[in-house]
Image (cartoon, rainbow, N blue to C red):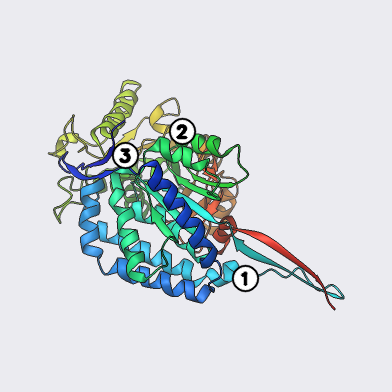
Amino acid sequence: MTSRQQTISPVDGSIYAERPFAGAAEIDAAMNRAIRAQRGWAEIGIAERAAFCERFCDALLSRTEEIALELTWQMGRPVAQAPGEVRTCVDRARFMIAHAAEGLKPLDPGLKQGFKRYVKRVPLGVVFVIAPWNYPFLTAINTVIPAIMAGNAVVLKHSAQTQLVAERFAQAFQAAGLPEGVFQYLHIAGATAESLVRDARIAHVAFTGSVAVGHAVSKAASDRFISVGLELGGKDPAYVRADADIGFAAENLVDGAFFNSGQSCCGIERIYVHEAVFDDFVARAVEVANQYRLGDPTAQQTNLGPVVSVKAAEFIRAQVAEALAQGAEQKIDPAHFAVDAVGTPYLAPQILVNVSHKMRVMTQETFGPVVGIMKVASDAEAIALMNDSPYGLTAALFSSDLEAAEAIGAQIETGTVFLNRCDFLDPALPWVGVKDTGRGHTLSIWGYEHLTRPKSFHLRLP
């Protein structure tokens, strides 16, 4: 195994960043610092913790443009869109800071004569965060800030593709004056991270990534009585009812499928459309998709960049080719997008019709700018198809009937149900997946439950 971690830029295939992997002594020292720091940090009040975290937000926000360009080179997000992730990261962090007191407040079980009783939420200890490259700031912040606000110490292992994000977090916390050891990062390989999950000094693991690696993380933690939060794969569906605003639905669902080159855990990967409006919806969706500008993500006019790697592009192309061989029809001409080329991470967006659940493109995660659209005859058929998946993160409904949407939503096996929107995360609501999409939840006041444990006080009055 190489002793260095490289970031290969999808922009031009160059090595954009290279760092040495942390050695055993460095890892051990970091873990010991985290243990020592967490003990003191847990004694600090919530208001004081909030002040440190607010300064972290200020420091991160002050370097938005620099960080955004760096993000573009690391994972290919168009530079016109990249600043949005930094700003949203700060907004999400500030929401969790503002609601920490509510999420961490003691619980009162009620009066009992002669006793004082209450339940405190106390920190777990050291939280190990393993973050992915596709939304590198947002996925990390979901746990980093609430874990620190709850009194834990955090050790972050970021993806090799976006390793500089970990360093930017550390710089912002340093600028905020956070006590040494409360937040640290380690540049380590996946196998080393897996072994670190077994370390007795780790009290909680938060992993975002593939189902396969999620199983490995869960297995590594299986011999220890610690909590593990997993946000894994997705194949998020949408259903367009006959009463939907078709133009609005097409515009929003194409964006939900193709933003970030389709590399989103809650991106739209399959759409079911009522037969009464199917042809109209497909025509509108194709019109919207053909307006995208695929190209160099460092150029301001680009709104669709490359996928993360040539390997990822080859996987996506193979799914599409297989579907076409099975009878699917592509509605987008790749020649319309001049830079689309085999052997590169630049590939045109694609809309497929005449698809079925016999095709991988409708059942397995694609993680690229491809969406299949199926015709359905009823709500019942749409519900059955949406639930015909091993995944369950979000599902989007487009309809003018709120009552019908709520009834449909109640039957969908997913963590979040949207109406007339998609591909969005509201920090006031728990972010949770079901089935193979994961375990546990982050964000909102309920997110603090997984980063603390209850401690009961049962006091007989003198």
Point out the frontmost of discs 2 and 3: 2
| Amino acid type, mark 3 | Gly
Q: What residue is shown with label 3? A: 368
| Relative image position of residue 135 (x, y in whole percent) | 35, 51
| Foreground pick, 190 / 347 | 190
Q: What residue is shown with label 2? A: 212
| Foreground pick, 412 / 108 | 108
In the image, taking residue 404 as reference, residue 88 lies left or right, namely left
Among the two numbered marks 1 and 2 on one chain, the one whose residue lies closer to the N terminus = 1
* Quarter holding residue 137: bottom left
Which secondary structure lies at badge 3?
loop
| Residue shown at 78% from the left, 71% from the top | 110
Instruction: Give the quarter of the figure containing the N terminus.
Output: top left
* Quarter holding residue 166: bottom left
| Relative image position of residue 170 (x, y in whole percent) | 34, 60
Among the two numbered marks 3 and 1 on one chain, the one whose residue lies closer to the N terminus = 1
Instruction: Give the quarter of the figure containing the C terminus.
Output: bottom right
Judged from this view, the residue extending furthest toward the top is: 325
Judged from this view, the residue extending furthest toward the right is: 113
| Amino acid type, mark 1 | Lys
Q: What residue is shown with label 1? A: 105
Which secondary structure lies at badge 2?
helix
Mark 3–mark 1 Cα distance, whole angstroms, equals 42 Å
| Amino acid type, mark 2 | Ala
Which secondary structure lies at badge 1?
loop
Mark 1–mark 2 Cα distance, whole angstroms, equals 36 Å
Position of residue 440 relative to residue 426, above or below, is above
